[in-house]
Amino acid sequence: MAMNTAFLALLQLLLLLIPPSLRDYLGARPRDHGVDQQLQVYHPIILQGGFGCPKLEARLTDAYTPSLPRCGALKGKGWFPLWNGTGDLLNHHYMRCFEEQMSLVFDPVMNGYQNQHGVETRVPNFGSAYGFSYKDETCPFCCNLRLRNELEALGYRDGDNLFGAPYDIRHAPPRPGQYSQVYSEYFARVKDLVQNASEKNGNKPVIFIGHSFASRLILDFVNSTPLQWRKKFIKHLVLLSPTPHTGFMDVVANLVSGPRVFPFPNVPNLALRPMWWSFASSLLSLPSPMVFGHEPLIITKHRNYSAYDYPDFLAALGFSIKGVSPLTKLPPPTDMRVEAPMVPTTVLSGFGIETTKQMVFWDGNFDVSPELVYGDGDGVVNFNSVLAFTKELERQQVLENILFKFVKIPNVAHGDITIQDHSLKIVLDEILEANS
């Protein structure tokens, strides 16, 4: 496994020397997988990339008061790419401004999140499978690029029968009984996209394919729709390395040590922690007590913290958004909230990769690198949580005689499921089966 990982890393570095257009074309295409063919039926596909993949644009109004003069240089100059790549932000010394303009504000009265005053944002390229891209060149095949290439080799075309619904990574779908204006509008747009894609393709129902965080959004979207609507318009869900509602330890690690999903060279994750804390999505998918129980997740010499202890742990961490602690966004300790979509569903997940299950801060200093204790998973999501999540989905689906399939792929990391040849072949086979 170590040799395969090292070879993949070397291959990706060598590919950086190739011009981007040629690099995309040469992206190792598994032609021996039997997909170099035309299909008899093309169900429209909505292809969704993971958390690091959507872009974000911003516009600064006169109401914006920058903390530094250079942060207001684009005020009144229309829309500009705020989260589109790491190189420009570093080259133009815009990191401080990026953190400020990306950050959200929590309104305790509205019990919701909004942009900084005077900052407007939008997600570009809605409707396109090309609305997702990795933000630096260390991973040229990330964000489903190889999978998209394979679908195009099959005859799929962006805007005709291949679509995408990029999202604002900072926000989170609301729990039952809560409201999110951002997601209310987003889900309405996705619903229109599904209906238009179906109508454009002879009223065929749609196949959703989502990776990581996008799988979570797909499930939440589908479960927000009337049952009759989803049975008419959705043919199949294909969920790749999903971040489950039952939670996973990487969410805690990001809260403590800063986010790993922003690949800025020479910028420590810890420096981005205040910005990360301001995102509603930072509190999504915390490890559920129903799966992780009372086992310590965070270990110190004075006290351990389990999945039942989030309020105390976040207080010890100093978690807040400009002095306001949005703990009302935390789920109740016994709330696992796994709701099956009640449409045919296939879940594919890797396992056999060291995955953090505990973090040790023996002296109680959360600003230093912890000792890590590993368990099984895909390097991001703990496998015990995946098993609990899929077991509950299957239980609900089987009760209604609705197809559910769980495909376990050994020794495949979270982000590699659509990159490695072996796992990509399995993914493609499942998509072809769903399309039949």
Image (spheres, helix red, strand yellow):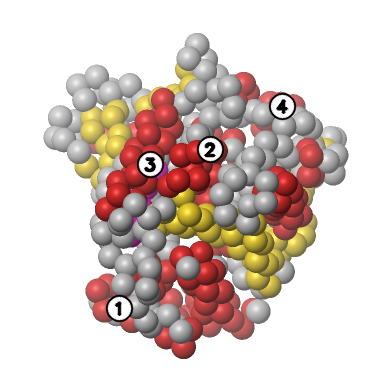
Label 4 to label 2, Cα distance in Å? 27 Å
Is residue 72 positioned above or below 164 on the image? Answer: above
Q: Nearer the viewer, mark 2 or mark 1?
A: 2
Tell me, yes or no, whether the two marked residues, 4 and 2, touch with CB atoms within 8 Å.
Answer: no
Circle 1 crowding by C-alpha within 10 Å: few under 14, some 14–19, many from 20: few
Q: Which residue is mark 4?
A: 332
Secondary structure state at the residue bearing disc 3: helix
Query: Which disc is residue 205 wearing?
Result: none
Q: Which residues are magenta?
A: 162-167
Q: Is residue 42 left or right of residue 348?
A: left
Amino acid type, label 4:
Pro
Earlier residue among tags 1 and 4: 1
Tag 1, which secondary structure? helix
Residue drawn where x is 68% and y is 46% of the image: 400
Q: Which mark is residue 190?
A: 3
Q: Quadrant of residue 241?
A: bottom right
**Disc 3 + disc 1, Cβ < 8 Å:** no
The Cα–Cα distance between marks 3 and 1, rounded to whole angstroms, is: 30 Å
Question: What residue does disc 1 label?
Answer: 25
Kindly check if marks 2 and 3 are in contact, taking CB atoms under 8 A apart as contact. Answer: no
Tag 1: residue type? Tyr
**Mark 4 vs mark 2: which is more N-terminal?**
2
